[in-house]
Amino acid sequence: MFRYTVDVTGMTCQHCVSHVTEELSACAGVQNVSVALEPAGLSQITINADAPLTDEVITQAIDEAGDYPVQAIRQA
């Protein structure tokens, strides 16, 4: 199991969470996505996958969801 934590800005509501979750869930290997929404600051996305993901794949999926700048990606 691979686990990633992604810090993003610009997410303000559950609609944002829904879009990001949908786009990331569509990536090959992704099993689960959860979002800790911080409307006025840094939201944290946790991704569990059964295959490794590149930073580019993660960033591209988040970009597809909307204007949510990625601040950091960490693999746990």
Image (cartoon, rainbow, N blue to C red):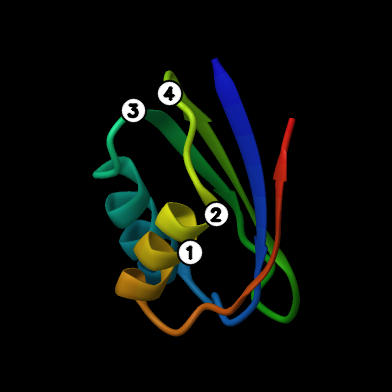
Q: Which residue is mark 2?
A: 55
Callouts 2 and 3 close, C-beta under 8 Å: no
Kindly state the secondary structure of the residue where label 1 is placed. Answer: helix
Q: Give whichever of discs 3 and 1 has the lower sequence position.
A: 3
Instruction: Estimate how packed mark 3 is, as few (under 14), some (14 to 19) or many (20 or more) residues with alpha carbons within 10 Å.
Output: some
Viewer-closest of 49 and 43: 49
Q: With respect to residue 76, does 1 lie above or below? A: above
Image coords of residue 63 (percent x, y): 40, 74
| Residue at point 36%, 61% (across, down) | 61
Q: With respect to residue 58, does 41 lie above or below? A: below
The span from disc 2 to disc 3 (Cα, nearest Å) is 14 Å
Amino acid type at mark 3: Gly
Callouts 1 and 2 close, C-beta under 8 Å: yes
Kindly state the secondary structure of the residue where label 2 is placed. Answer: helix
| Residue at point 36%, 49% (across, down) | 24
Screen quadrant of the N terminus:
top right
The tag on residue 59 is 1
Image coords of residue 11 (percent x, y): 54, 75
Q: Give whichever of discs 2 and 3 has the lower sequence position.
A: 3
Amino acid type at mark 1: Thr
Viewer-closest of 44 and 57: 57
Instruction: Estimate how packed mark 1 is, as few (under 14), some (14 to 19) or many (20 or more) residues with alpha carbons within 10 Å.
Output: many
Q: Give whichever of discs 4 and 1 has the lower sequence position.
A: 4
Callouts 4 and 1 close, C-beta under 8 Å: no
Front disc: 2 or 3: 2
Callouts 3 and 4 close, C-beta under 8 Å: yes
Q: Which residue is mark 4?
A: 51
The span from disc 3 to disc 4 (Cα, nearest Å) is 5 Å
Residue 43, quarter of picture? bottom right
Q: Which residue is mark 3?
A: 29
